Image (cartoon, rainbow, N blue to C red):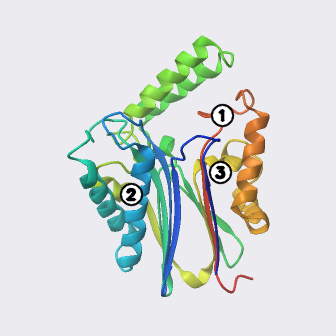
């Protein structure tokens, strides 16, 4: 088995809010990748990096220690334990309380379990070399009313020049409405303080013998496909095979710098934190 990992902040002096880790112990292996969101200081004195480190560590430990338990159960308990660690000192009811997307995978015996919650990605390449993306897109979760409202707000934003006050105001309104849809009826779901959202995750199980490789990415790396359109998911995995996580992130950084003003490729951040875990299993052809 070959394991490669990279997890980098959006720039020098910036605190990385992503999390990536792998555990290999006996015949159990697991990976966890999180993309932290929320507002530091908004009801919580710890901040997003503390939250992702705590939640990620709990989930990785539980996934390995309870190898026969569903990953959704492990995530629910990890969320509960993390919430319990700061519920007495922080207001976890705030909509911007620290939270994160989640990608997890675990291989044990002849099975491979996986879980994806919100907009980080898991790419599963089979022995037939076909790549199966597991994607939980937040906007696809929305009911028609909120979805139309967000689309209209994005159109208003993109109608104004980059750098204009009007565009900035429209972007702030889009962000405000989007925040209000997190973990709410008719909205989308992230791992925050409610363990019940674990049941909303996409989950699945495959025979381990059918899997050639796994790639878990936060959107800061997945933007190579989803924002910049530099290749397909299959080509993304092929790039990881050749150049590893560092190569993929380096190419994303090049694309971000070439469009620093976000004129050609509208996105929430000019440069984003990025995390990638890439696992190739023994015997891959």
Q: Is 103 left or right of 40, judged from the image as shown?
A: right
Q: Position of residue 70 (x, y in %)?
A: 36, 72
Q: Nearer the viewer, residue 71 or 144?
A: 71
How far apart, in angstroms, are the residues tagged by discs 2 and 3?
21 Å
| Residue at 58% across, 40% down | 14
| Residue at 57% across, 26% down | 154
Q: Position of residue 201 (x, y in %)?
A: 41, 57
> Circle 2 — which element?
helix
Residue at image mark 1: 270
How far apart, in angstroms, are the residues tagged by discs 3 and 1?
13 Å
Q: Position of residue 177 (x, y in %)?
A: 43, 27
* Mark with earlier residue (2, 1): 2
Q: Position of residue 45 (x, y in %)?
A: 33, 39
Q: Is residue 232 above or below residue 285?
A: above
Q: Is 192 left or right of 254, judged from the image as shown?
A: left
Residue at image mark 2: 55
Residue at image mark 3: 221
Nearer the observer: mark 2 or 3; the answer is 2
* Mark with earlier residue (3, 1): 3
């Amino acid at each position: 088995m070959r394991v490669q990992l990279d997890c980098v902040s959006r720039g020098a002096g910036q605190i990385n809010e992503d999390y990536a880790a792998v555990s290999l112990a006996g015949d159990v292996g697991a990976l966890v990748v999180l993309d932290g969101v929320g507002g530091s200081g908004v009801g919580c004195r710890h901040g997003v990096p503390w939250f992702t480190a705590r939640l990620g560590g709990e989930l990785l430990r539980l996934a390995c220690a309870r190898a026969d338990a569903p990953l959704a159960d492990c995530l629910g308990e990890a969320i509960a334990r993390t919430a319990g660690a700061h519920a007495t000192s922080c207001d976890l009811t705030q909509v911007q309380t620290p939270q994160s997307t989640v990608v997890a995978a675990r291989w044990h015996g002849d099975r491979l379990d996986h879980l994806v919650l919100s907009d980080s990605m898991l790419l599963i390449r089979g022995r037939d070399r076909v790549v199966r993306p597991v994607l939980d897109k937040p906007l696809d979760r929305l009911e028609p009313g909120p979805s139309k409202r967000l689309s209209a707000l994005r159109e208003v934003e993109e109608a104004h020049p980059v750098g204009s006050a009007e565009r900035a105001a429209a972007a702030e309104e889009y962000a405000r409405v989007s925040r209000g849809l997190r973990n709410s009826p008719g909205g989308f779901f992230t791992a925050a303080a409610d363990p019940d959202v674990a049941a909303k995750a996409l989950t699945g199980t495959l025979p381990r013998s059918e899997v050639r490789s796994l790639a878990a990415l936060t959107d800061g790396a997945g933007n190579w496909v989803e924002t910049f359109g530099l290749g397909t998911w299959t080509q993304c995995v092929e790039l990881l095979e050749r150049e590893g996580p560092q190569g993929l992130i380096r190419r994303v950084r090049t694309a971000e710098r070439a469009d620093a003003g976000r004129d050609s490729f509208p996105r929430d951040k000019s440069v984003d934190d990025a995390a990638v875990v890439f696992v190739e299993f023994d015997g891959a052809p």
